[in-house]
Image (tube, helix red, strand yellow):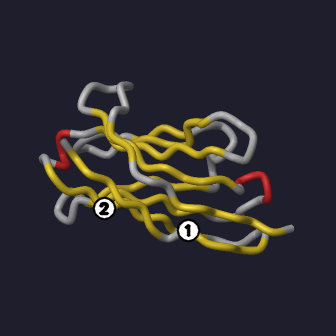
Amino acid sequence: QVQLVESGGGLVQAGGSLRLSCAASGRTFSNYVMAWFRQAPGKGREFVARISRNIGITYYADSVKGRFTISRNNANNTVYLQMNSLKPEDTAVYYCAAAEVPGLYNHWGQGTQVTVSS
């Protein structure tokens, strides 16, 4: 079992930047593919980005490609999401997720709110 705690959300103007962090505890962090998802008001949860266990292969949703960067530090059990050029449509609760089996995200954090004003 792994526990996930997100931080770094907040209110930012359009065009601004935020950096989200997700601290993991419990089982070996490097065993997990890590990802970020988000859920906007009235919408379903959508995939944002993921990063592989050790060599850091990344994959992004088209809506954030070129603006967001996912990274991880296996030494301090943390995954990050650097968000640049933020848009009002990026407003959502952002969730960190972990998967031992690629694609099967069965560990989730509590979420952190990101609000982008126009």
| Kind of residue at badge 1 | Gly
* Mark 2 burial class by Cα count in 10 Å: few <14, some 14-19, many 20+: some
Compared across the picture, whether 62 is left or right of 118 comes to left
Residue 11 vs residue 17, the one in the foreground? 11
Q: Is residue 7 above or below residue 45?
A: below
Residue underneath mark 2: 23
Q: Quadrant of residue 93?
A: bottom right
* Mark 1 burial class by Cα count in 10 Å: few <14, some 14-19, many 20+: some
| Kind of residue at badge 2 | Ala
The quadrant of the image that shows the C terminus is bottom right
How far apart are the alpha carbons under marks 2 and 1?
14 Å
- Residue drawn at x 69%, y 47% is 40
Q: Position of residue 3 (x, y in %)?
A: 26, 51
Judged from the image, the secondary structure of the residue bearing numbered disc 1 is loop
Which comes sooner in the sequence, label 2 or label 1? 1
The quadrant of the image that shows the N terminus is top left
- Residue drawn at x 66%, y 37% is 62
- Residue drawn at x 22%, y 44% is 54
Residue underneath mark 1: 9
Q: Position of residue 26 (x, y in %)?
A: 15, 52
